[in-house]
Every structure is written in C-alpha cells, then in structure tokens.
Image (spheres, grey):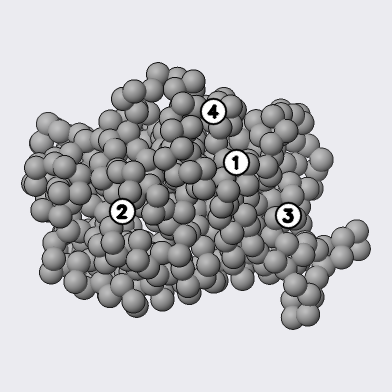
Amino acid sequence: MTSEHSAFGLRPSATFDAATIAGIQRAARTGVYHIRGGGAKRRVPHFDDLLLLGAGMSRYPLEGYRERCDTDVVLGTRNARFPLHLDIPVTIAGMSFGALSAQAKEALGRGASEVGTSTTTGDGGMTREERGQSKHLVYQYLPSRYGMNPADLRKADAIEVVLGQGAKPGGGGMLLGQKISDRVATMRTLPPGIDQRSACRHPDWTGPDDLAIKILELREITDWEKPVYVKVGAARTYYDVKLAVAAGADVVVVDGMQGGTAATQEVFIEHVGIPVLAAIPQAVRALRELDVHRKVQLIVSGGVRTGADVAKALALGADAVAIGTAALIALGDNDPRHAAAYADLGSAPGCYDDYQDGRDPAGITTQDPELAARLDPVEGGRRVANYLRVLTMEAQTLARACGKSHLLHLEPEDLVALTVEAAAMARVPLAGTSWVPGGEW
C-alpha cells in the first residue's frame, strides 16, 4: 500500500493481507500446498517479552573484569558412563546432511568444537566430515532410520531419539528430489532424484513402554557409555517430558514452534505446536514433580538468537539451549552479499526460506556441487565459533548483572514479563507487579 493509495482512502484488510492474498492466488494457480523451510513467521510470545532483573541493593552484582561467571554444563549424568562435558550451554541442533551440504555440516562441527560444545547429525546419517571435525557429536535416531547403523552409533558421543520437531510436531520430514544427490541417496538407501518423506512416528513403537525397550537396546549397543536424549516438539510438553523420563531419557530436548526445518508444509509451520516460552515451564514442572530437575537435563530450542535468549531460557530452568536457524545465519544464510542471487530466485536477504529447492546461493542448504563449493567450511566454522562466543559472553554479562557466578544459577526470580500473555506462559510476574496470571503452580 503506497501513500498514493492511502490518499484515496484505500486500505488493506487485516484478515486478507498481502501475504494471505498471494497464498490464495498461488494455491488457485498451482493446486498444491506451499512447502518451504525455516520456522514460524508469525509473532508469538517469545524471550523478547521477558526482562531480567539486574542487581541493586537487594542483590549484589558481580564485577565483569574480576569475578568469574562460569558457563560449563554436563549432560547425561543419569545413566551414561561418559556424560558430555561442554564448555558452554549452547549446542548446535540436528540438521541433516541432505538438508545441508557436506561443507555446512563440517563447518558446524568445526565451530562447535572450537568453543567446546556439541553438534548434532540430523536425519540421514553421519558424514565423515562432520565426525572428523566434531569433538562432541550427538547422533540422531529418527523414525526414518536413514543412514542409521550400529557402527555410527558407537562413534557418537551421545544419541538423540527424535520423536518430534518444533516446526512440525506430529509430522515427518521432507527432502525433495532435487536435493537427493548420489551421495545422499547412498547414505539413505534411496533412489537419487526422488522426493523423500520421513515417517512421522517410529514404526515399531506404539507407546512409552516401547521407547523404554528401544532406549535399553541403544544403551546395550553402545555399552552404556553414551547419554541418550529424547527430543520432542513442543505441544503437550508436560506429559511428553514425564513419559520421556519414565522411558529412561538422560536428557530431554524440547523444541518450540519457532524452530526451523529444511522443508515442510507452511500450514504446519505456522499452525502446529506452542512457543518455546510456553513449553519450558511445562517441562520444568514435569521434571520437578518427578524430582529429576537438573538430574535429567533439559535442552530447549526454537528461536534462540542472542545471549539474552540464552540467559532467559536458563533462568526458566533449562540446562542448555540448541540453535539451528541462528547457526545457519552465522554461516552466511540470508547474507546481503547474495542479494542479487536471492532476487533471481524471487526472494531477498532476510526473507529467503526456500531451503527445499536446493538452489541456495550461500551453499548451505544445497547439494549442488557448484553452489556448495561457495561455502568454505574453515571460514564458516570460524564464523559459527565467533557467534557462539558472543552468545556466551552476552549471557555471562547478564548473569553477572543478576549477581550469578554461573549461568545455571539464573532462576525464574530473575525474570519479569512485559505482557500478560508472556507472564502466563513463562509463569513469572508481570513487570512491576507480583501477579502471575493463572497463579503459581
């Protein structure tokens, strides 16, 4: 809508806005639903709706240049003989080879290793580049079982059983044919060039009792060495976390609806699941009722972007966070230097989400050899490491201001909410009041 249109009294509809109109027109023209990558684009209550309460008279802040604020975390202490000792509580989420190029997977491993944290495989198996450059590698065990084998399980440092993903809880994954290269096809035992859809549930599990049996199998295959995570998409989080713990999980991963994906239906991304802000308190409540909070560690993901997001997630009760979309941006996704190439694809920096097409000019979400070669994994790893350092330093700055000598000492009492919705979801008081909508749990 231009000022010229406004001058004539014309105005767009809030219900049928430009994006909605374009979506209807596209559906009418093609007869197929819209598939894209990325996460939810709608505004939902998020970490921005919370504020930290810095110290004053009633709390004593720490001096940033003289007093330590530690950042390490240990994951998988419940049953594993070799828990993961990470230097920072920020990890890299699972993103598959296939969705990402081999160069991108290697870069993520390099970046994570440089700062002493973990990265995660994703659907499609473990690449030699990723294993070779990752000090701590979490191996995802998904319904599709693409690329899964006992040898790679034993090479991993932890195993993540994936039951759901924040961008599509209840739905399976997609990898369109243009990204099924010969190498991807070989690793997944699929024909090249054919669209692939992952199952939405594990084929031999009908409930938590079956999951307990599967976790026991995984422990026996790996000689009880590896921590076993269970990942769920944020939906019925309270019950899912309780069942995951009952099944034997060492770590529970909760992925909010702002989490990204390589490809799925847009209607799924925007309309299924709950924000991570609402999911964390539900997960913490479930863990506390089982008396395993901090004994079974909680990793949360879905829209983590800054050190403030990290600090707020930890204050709500998480032990660590995982980043996916932000890590891709650090690698070079949506970089303005690719503006001309994005324009050729009908997109723009800041808006590019066609990860499903395999034509990513940044060389990250593609299997095209020429495009993938544009990403230098050494330089990419350096950028990811720099970004992870900044996240950590920002979180430390905020924790010191709250008087905390360790990031994990942050607590809900350090938080207030700016909106009634955020206060109700996060279970913290509305700023300037002692009111928690819905009452205390």
Residue at x 46% of width, y 54% of height: 157
Q: Write down the residue under mark 2.
A: 126
Q: Are marks 2 and 4 in contact (CB under 8 Å)?
A: no
In the picture shown, does residue 415 fall above or below 59? above
Instruction: Tell which of 437 and 235 is nearer to you.
Output: 235
- In primary-sequence order, the first of circles 3 and 2 is 2
Position of 363 with respect to 242 (left or right) is left
Instruction: Tell which of 378 and 16 is nearer to you.
Output: 378
Instruction: Indicate which disc residue 79 carries.
Output: 1
Q: Dot 2: within a 10 Å radius of its alpha carbon, few (fewer than 14), some, or many (20 or more) residues?
A: many
Q: Write down the residue under mark 3.
A: 410
Q: Of helix, strand and loop, which one carries label 3?
A: loop
Residue pushed farthest bottom? 65
Residue at x 51% of width, y 63% of height: 117
Q: Are marks 1 and 2 in contact (CB under 8 Å)?
A: no
Q: CA distance from mark 3 to mark 2?
A: 35 Å
Which-is-in-front pick, marks 1 and 2? Answer: 1
Instruction: Tell which of 216 and 105 is nearer to you.
Output: 216
Q: CA distance from mark 2 to mark 4?
A: 25 Å
Three-letter residue code for mark 1 = Asn
Q: Write down the residue under mark 4.
A: 247
